Image (spheres, helix red, strand yellow):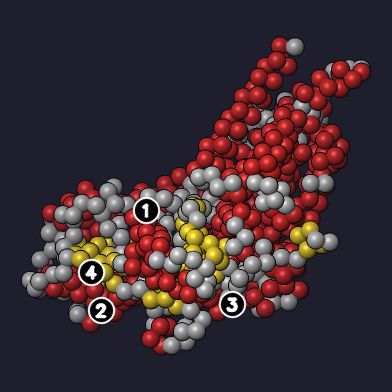
Amino acid sequence: MRNIRGTTGTLLAAGAVLALAAAGCSSGSSSPGSSGPKTIRLITGVKSDPFYITMTCAAQTEAKAKGLTFTADGSAQWDVSVQKPLIDSVAAAKPDGLLISPVDTAALTPSLKQLQSSGTKIGLVDTSVTDPSVGITRISSDNEKGGHVAAQALAKLMGDKGSVIVISVKPGVSTTDARIKGFTDEMAGHPGIKVLPTLYDNDLPATAASQIQSTLAAHPDLGGVFAGNTNTGQGIATGLKQAHKQGLVKVAAFDAEPDEITALQAGTVQVLVAQDPAAIGTQGVDQLAAAFAGKPVTGQIGTTMVAITQQNMNDPAVSKYFYKGAC
Amino acid sequence: MTAQDSATGAAAGPAAQMPPRAGLAGWSARIARMSETWTLAILLVLVAFFSIAAPGKFFTTYDITQIAVNAAIYLVLGVGMTFVIITAGIDLSIGSILVLAAVASGEYNIHHGGAASGWGTVAVCVLIALAVGTAWGALQGALVATGKIPALIVTLGGLGAALGLAEIATGGQDPAGAASDHLQSSLGYGKLLGVPWLVVLAAAVTVVFGLVLAGTRFGNYTFAIGSNPAAARRAGIGVGRHLVKVYALMGLLAGLGSVMWLSSYGTTSIAGHSTDNLKVITAVVLGGTSLFGGRGSVLGTVIGVFIPAVLTTGLIVIGVQQYWQDVAVGAVLVAAVYIDQMRRQSRERG
């Protein structure tokens, strides 16, 4: 999971469920094995997120090239109660293949297993579920490696000395925990850098701003921050600016969304660790197409990560990793 | 906060006036019965504790400024919420109103120069934010006053609807260029005699509305409606009209909060305000304002905003694990409401 949106009000979620359920009713249906082009559905974690938009665009292009029928949808929020009705509506349509970024590691397993037993080939993209029997392929970024990449770039900017802190979104999330583990493991190889205990801001920029300023009060030698996601990054940028430490304390963040690229240009963030959502989308379609054709399928695929800084951001080999706001 | 002295008089509304007593004993008894006294004591104990635990790190100019800046927006929202809760109402929608107002003014800014827009655009954006907030608040107030719908439900609906409209307008993504650089460099990061403008603005709002609550007819009506709406109606107060005004005031201050947010964060943070309502209600209740209406003060809210702020900062500075912050704030909240209940019971008996 790359991004956890704040849990908005229950009512909002309930309203979205109703809306989505209503939308689900109107979707057409076909059955696996029917003649004509094979169909692939994609359900992403958060529909409006540039990460998932980039992934969807790449999957769509690849599906078109392979002559597959492709439709995509995504949850309005990062919430099981919002994504489950989407899966149910897909189950009614019985597509040949489903690519999904499940928003929970367990809660959606029964729905997905049912869908799988009715003949739909499932590929898990970006996030996954704990039960290993779900899905014929799992494609995601190597998050622990991403943590290493972030730590290397940050240590270099810090001159290998000072304190560094991780401000993340929530504890107990497999992907962000893996990033933090990779980050701290890498920092252990830099004896001049002290890693402070991780703080969590519950996806609230105001909390992140207060936390970074409090940390500065306690640790004036703070030289670097590793931000959990975009909201956290915004809060950290504001906190540092108010403390007049912007640029002095180096900030590393995950992802390369349009507003993060702007922040990198403006100097509020110094390192962006970009995932490769386009490769995840393309690989997902490729693997399902292989399964349709009865060819061998790779069970586990880890995509690369790249560190973007102000120095290398204009290099086309790096700028191709920027996420898109629209196809 | 400079608001403290002027707002003290709002401790007890006319409906909850203490019987007059003479002498020093009467004074000390009266002070002990003011709920601000207890919460202020908690705040002072916390400040003293962290100052001793982290000498030279906690009670510094840097740290006080930092706490005040981070509390500024919640303080502005808290002042409005104090009025609402004194009428025995509640407003769950403030975070969504803030986002909606920020998106409305942000969209105008994007189409009139973006980050490089001039002062004229900034002024229009501020007016848009205040107008959107006030209008949304007034609409909710009208529903509460005339529609026979509980405030909890009206504002719960408003919470979803306002956020939904903001998401429709933006496609769920924070738009770039929502705040002018002029706004950010002045209100967001500028200072007046060393005090950040955000803090100056929040203090001014607090003083003005502390005085309004304590010393004007508007304030008296607010207390009267919260104490006994039927009696207030018989006394000739236009209860419905007054409620519309109170909710509109809450909306206005949420609109002002959105201007403060845009100036310091530079983005609309659509997903970042889902718990503003709980934070602000916690602060107001911590400050001794009764959820049952009729009693409360702006000064109490000031203290109530600063207790969680001091706790969070202090615990980070002394290096205590973060999860304890939530435990501590929760415990203090429940204790404050318990004291409030005991005081009410003893007053009703006496």
Q: Residue at x 79, y 29 (%)?
A: B12
Gap between marks 2 and 1 measured at Cα: 30 Å
Which amino acid lies under the numbered mark 3 shown in the image of this protein?
A: Ala
Q: Residues within 10 Å of mark 1 (few under 14, many from 20)?
A: some
Up-down: is A209 above or below B278? below
Which amino acid lies under the numbered mark 1 shown in the image of this protein?
A: Val
Q: Which residue is mark 2?
A: A62
Q: As rendered, which of B71 and A124 lies closer to the eye? A: B71
Q: Is residue B139 visible?
A: no
N-terminal-most mark, 1 or 3: 1
Direction from residue A319 to residue B262 in the image, left or right? right
Q: Residues within 10 Å of mark 2 (few under 14, many from 20)?
A: many
Q: Which residue is mark 3?
A: A266
Which amino acid lies under the numbered mark 2 shown in the image of this protein?
A: Glu
Gap between marks 4 and 2 measured at Cα: 17 Å
Q: As rendered, which of A36 and A295 lies closer to the eye? A: A295
Q: Position of residue B290 (x, y in %)?
A: 68, 30
Badge 2 and badge 1 both on one subunit = yes
Which numbered dot is residue B350? none
Direction from residue A291 to residue A6 in the image, left or right? right
Q: Residue at x 79, y 46 (%)?
A: B1
Q: Residues within 10 Å of mark 4 (few under 14, many from 20)?
A: some
